[in-house]
Amino acid sequence: MKLVAGLGNPGQEYVYTRHNMGWAVIDHWVRERSLGGPVSKFRGEFWRDRDFILLKPLTFMNLSGLAVREAVGFYKLEPSDVLVICDDIALPFGRLRLRGKGSAGGHNGLASVIACLGTLAVPRLRVGVGDSVSGNKINWVLGHLPGEEMKALPGLLADAAEGAEAWASLGLERAMSRVNAKDRERT
């Protein structure tokens, strides 16, 4: 059993914002697999897809770890069985980076997951959203995607969902080679 947790914020005002990339990947997965509506569980929206648990925490970004910890506890998973999908301003828009561990890099949602699971060794798939030229990071991540990025979004979400599946089926190292190499091909 593997848990894929897409981080984001609840509410219509956050749909198609940079900060909700994790949710967008889960939404894409759910649509592509025709998984239907979610079950309310683990302080979030929850779906089962074969050996996957898909989770969109409804705790708001900064408390995402609470929802992830509940699912991990219920299913008795190890942190290595969890993949967190989140936005990353340090990566240009459209780039993906899969890693097995590390700091939160200033991402409050990822920091919450790391704190709640008690380890830096939590796999994460970071979805690049670029950085603000004005320096206002909060307005940038909570801002809506412009038209050009919206056009590229379906392909990016498909690649991210494929990366999450590779993590679960191929293992971390092989998936990192695939996801991170594919990313280099995009640039």
Image (cartoon, rainbow, N blue to C red):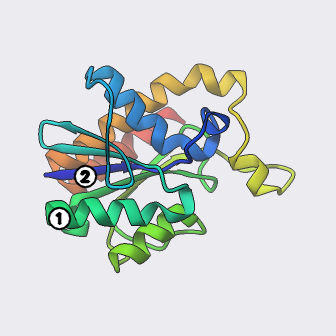
Which residue in the protein does label 1 denote? Answer: 77
Q: Disc 1 marks which amino acid?
A: Leu
**Residue most toward the right?**
134
Disc with the residue nearer the chain's start (2 vs 1): 2
Rendered location of residue 108, percent (x, y) = 57, 66
Q: CA distance from mark 2 to mark 1?
A: 8 Å
Under tag 2, what secondary structure?
Answer: strand
Asked if residue 68 can be seen in this view, the reply is yes
Disc ID at residue 143: none
Up-down: is 136 above or below 46?
below
Q: Residue at x 48, y 23 (%)?
A: 154
Q: Residue at x 19, y 68 (%)?
A: 78
Q: Residue at x 60, y 68 (%)?
A: 106
Q: Residue at x 29, y 23 (%)?
A: 36
Rendered location of residue 115, percent (x, y) = 43, 77
Residues at discs 2 and 1 in contact (Cβ within 8 Å): yes
Residue 94 occupies quadrant: top right
Up-down: is 114 above or below 34?
below
Q: Nearer the viewer, residue 116 or 157?
A: 116
Left or right, 117 with respect to 141, comes to left
Left or right, 117 with respect to 183, comes to left
Q: Nearer the viewer, residue 76 or 101?
A: 76
Residue 123 occupies quadrant: bottom left
Which residue in the protein does label 2 denote? Answer: 3
Q: Nearer the viewer, residue 133 or 112?
A: 112
Rendered location of residue 121, percent (x, y) = 32, 73
Left or right, 167 with respect to 183, comes to left
Q: Disc 2 marks which amino acid?
A: Leu
Rendered location of residue 184, percent (x, y) = 46, 41
Asked if residue 100 can be seen in this view, the reply is no
Mark 2 is surrounded, within 10 Å at the Cα level, by few (under 14), some (14 to 19) or many (20 or more) other residues, namely many
